[in-house]
Amino acid sequence: MKPYLSALRVRFLNGLQYRAAALGGLATQFFWGVMLVFLYHAFYKNGPQSSGLGFSQLVTYIWLQQAFLALLMLFEYDFELFDMITSGGISYELCRPIQLFGFWYVKLLARRLSSAVLRFAPILAIAFLLPEPYKMSLPYSPVSFLLFLITMVLGVLLLVSISMIIYITVFKTMSPVGSMALIGITGEFFSGMTIPIPMMPQWLQTVCYFLPFRWTADLPLRVYSGNIAASEAVISIGVQIIWILVLVSTGAYAMNRITRKVVIQGG
């Protein structure tokens, strides 16, 4: 366990050094959030409101999404790991007395945490100070906030488990482009990061509930505002845990199998 905790700490501290990139990302996410809020405001003002998601809840959904984007988006890749696989540097990783899946898992987790720590507080601070109806709301209740924290933590763990599949497939394809496009685009859409799931047609919402992506972002964001009841959130936590166990065990097994015989590319 010590090597994995050390990797988590080192990677997290290293990520905190990229303050300029975080500042640029912060500005981009804030203005993107403003644009989305104005766009949906026009839609709610002039169109039917049959999505089951009130405008105040939607605004909170958007600001949480932008504040924790580094934690919730699938398009957060570590290209150093891709380079290790395609250039031959993976040979050094395989010499370490560690379980490769777990070691890379904590690396990806630390990368997301460091990016989020540098960005989320300023975005939330400004979002709470905006005028009505564009400001972010407080949690629906203390219970909702507690469930939000639990589902957010589990959602991040689940998202890292999904992203690990991309790195594993690169061992076979020797190019991350296809996996990034297929899993990344699919995951972003079905997690509610492109369009909130309550605003999708009912048949498409049903599809979302059968895939793991919805449990990464949509669930915690809607739990915060009370759009998902506490009783449903508790059941959903169990679903998140099941998905994490399934994907982690499957990913670890696949990684162990695929690294038994690796063809080193390059030097």
Image (tube, rainbow, N blue to C red):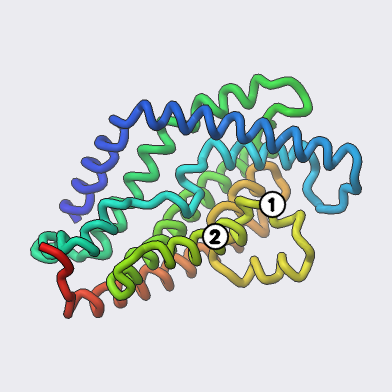
Q: Earlier in the sequence, mark 1 or mark 2?
A: 2
Residue found at x 77% / y 40%: 40
* Residue type highlighted by circle 1: Pro
Check disc 2: other Cα within 10 Å, few if <14, some if 14-19, many if 20+: some
Vertical relation: 40 (above or below) 17:
below
Vertical relation: 54 (above or below) 26:
below
Residue identifier under label 2: 185
Residue identifier under label 1: 196
User: Which structural element holds mark 1?
Assistant: loop
User: Which structural element holds mark 2?
Assistant: helix
Quadrant including the N terminus? bottom left
Residue 256 location (% of width, % of height): 23, 75
* Residue type highlighted by circle 2: Ile
Check disc 1: other Cα within 10 Å, few if <14, some if 14-19, many if 20+: many
Residue 114 falls left or right of residue 55: left
Residue found at x 30% / y 77%: 253
In this view, the residue in front, 143 or 103, is 103
Image quarter of residue 176: bottom left
